[in-house]
């Protein structure tokens, strides 16, 4: 059989050596890498030591059986598929394992071709998803300011040094972090992310460092933290400015020694990872004010990437909108649905909006437009931008009469456009809905250069 699963890592678990060896050879014949374990405990140790994409495990084993191993694997990595193989196949057992998260349940003696087909199918899906995730890290960079960011990412991606990404909320800092990982030499290893602002010190310590069994109420087993789980990959800490001084000291120690101690444990564990951090606040300013540790600041900011706000990258607004439009149409309307198009007035509205919420606000506006638009063309009122027409003028430079005229024109444009959309371009019906004569309605259309055919 042609090797197709290069890069896939499969953990083969069985207490019978011959079966384990046979399964490993089948997996290797597909081009995948097999890692063997003789029981559930050994399998968990292998799972902690290196990344695993798929688990093939026997059900009945000494020390720790397949059902318990399934639970432990799912606790650590919910997305990792687990296939149960057993000579004690009953409907009740199969249903129990599938309800616990097993992806498949096969009984022994199994057919080699059946194993090959199953591993090939699951492995192909996993590798395809991995490649899709990489290609999904897409950064729109038409504007020169964003092109400079991408150029810096390209220069530092393969370096293991820490990177600090700074920028306003919603500007795309995590997207840049994921792009750094996708372009790095550790792109096949995990990318693990946590928002430090969302967790208290105790929860953050448990999340990053892990905890020992009995460390606190509910800690019924040992658990690896994200620094361990990265296994040489990338750890992304968002909003690091929110960390307390106490936790800043603990993070500094990890960066200096590359050792972590799980909460409640007495021994240190070596860890290896590439650290990327992000902040929507100026860390240098916080250091000057004594609110952030200076020694940690210089550890984090070996390379500094500044992501510009959307208002400072105007050439990216429309390309980003088109990108989000395609994605939102596929998600909201279905993969084969034709997305609505951005009308010229909608594009103008996007270009004139100030985008205080940055790229995230733009994405939300496009998603809303796709949902509420009932026709083929997105209009400004579909976007839901909270801005009156006169507010678009700069620095209060317009006088009262100009602002009034601008506001009135904006109201007229939206009002008659909604009416035309509802009537699918029928002027008579739209005029009647607005309480206007056909002649008056047509005068407004002519005055605002609105073509009814755009609404048919």
Image: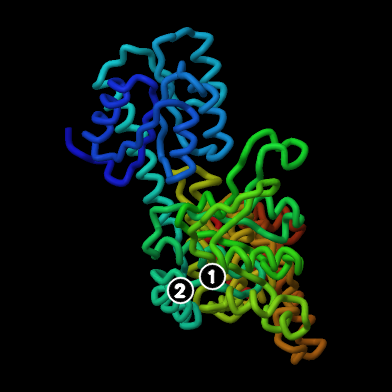
Q: Secondary structure at mark 2?
A: loop
Return the residue nearer the eye: 123 or 210: 210
Q: Position of residue 153 (x, y in %)?
A: 44, 73
Position of 333 relative to 353 (above/below)? above
Give the image location of residue 152, x and y in percent.
44, 78
Q: Residue furthest right?
A: 400
Front residue of this view, candidates 83 and 47: 47
x, y (%) of residue 250? 68, 63
Tell me the distance, in whole angstroms, between the alpha carbons under discs 2 and 1.
22 Å
Q: Mark 2 — residue?
A: 141
Q: Is residue 450 visible?
A: no
Q: Is residue 238 left or right of residue 62?
A: right
> From the viewer's perspective, is 404 left or right of 41?
right
Residue 149 or 123: which is nearer the viewer? 123
Numbered tag placed on residue 344 in the rendering: 1
In the rendered image of this protein, does residue 94 appear above or below residue 256? above
């Amino acid at each position: 059989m042609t090797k197709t699963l290069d890069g896939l890592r499969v953990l083969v678990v069985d207490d019978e050596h011959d079966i384990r060896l046979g399964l490993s050879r089948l997996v290797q014949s597909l081009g995948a890498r097999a890692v063997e374990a003789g029981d559930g405990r050994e399998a968990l140790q292998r799972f902690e030591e290196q990344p695993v994409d798929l688990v093939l495990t026997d059900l009945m084993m000494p020390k720790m059986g397949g059902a318990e191993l399934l639970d432990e694997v799912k606790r650590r990595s919910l997305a990792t598929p687990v296939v149960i193989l057993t000579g004690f196949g009953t409907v009740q057992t199969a249903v129990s394992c599938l309800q616990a998260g097993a992806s498949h349940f096969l009984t022994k003696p199994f057919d080699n071709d059946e194993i090959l087909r199953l591993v090939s199918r699951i492995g192909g899906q996993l590798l395809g998803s991995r490649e899709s995730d990489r290609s999904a890290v897409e950064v729109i960079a038409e504007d020169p300011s964003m092109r400079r960011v991408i150029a810096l990412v390209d220069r530092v991606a393969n370096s293991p040094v820490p990177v600090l990404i700074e920028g306003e909320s919603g500007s795309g800092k995590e997207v840049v972090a994921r792009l750094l990982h996708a372009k790095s030499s550790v792109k096949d290893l995990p990318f693990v992310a946590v928002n430090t602002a969302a967790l208290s010190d105790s929860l953050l310590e448990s999340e990053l460092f892990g905890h020992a069994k009995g460390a606190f109420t509910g800690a019924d087993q040992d658990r690896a933290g994200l620094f361990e789980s990265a296994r040489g990959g990338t750890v992304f800490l968002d909003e690091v400015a929110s960390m307390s001084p106490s936790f800043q000291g603990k993070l500094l120690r990890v960066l200096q020694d590359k050792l972590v101690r799980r909460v409640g444990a007495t021994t240190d564990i070596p860890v290896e990872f590439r650290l990327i951090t992000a902040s929507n606040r100026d860390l240098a300013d916080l250091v000057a004010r004594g609110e952030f540790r200076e020694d940690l600041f210089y550890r984090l900011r070996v390379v500094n990437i500044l992501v510009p706000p959307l208002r400072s990258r105007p050439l990216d607004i429309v390309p980003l909108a088109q990108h989000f439009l395609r994605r939102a149409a596929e998600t909201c309307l279905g993969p084969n649905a034709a997305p609505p198009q951005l009308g010229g007035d909608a594009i103008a509205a996007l270009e004139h909006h100030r985008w205080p919420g940055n790229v995230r606000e733009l994405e939300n506006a496009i998603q809303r437009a796709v949902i509420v638009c009932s026709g083929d063309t997105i209009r400004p009122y579909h976007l839901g931008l909270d801005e009156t027409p006169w507010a678009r003028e700069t620095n209060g430079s317009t006088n009262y009469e100009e602002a009034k005229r601008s506001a009135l024109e904006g109201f007229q444009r939206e009002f008659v456009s909604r009416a035309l959309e509802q009537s699918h371009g029928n002027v008579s019906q739209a005029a009647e809905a607005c309480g206007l004569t056909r002649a008056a309605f047509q005068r407004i259309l002519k005055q605002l250069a609105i073509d009814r055919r755009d609404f048919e």
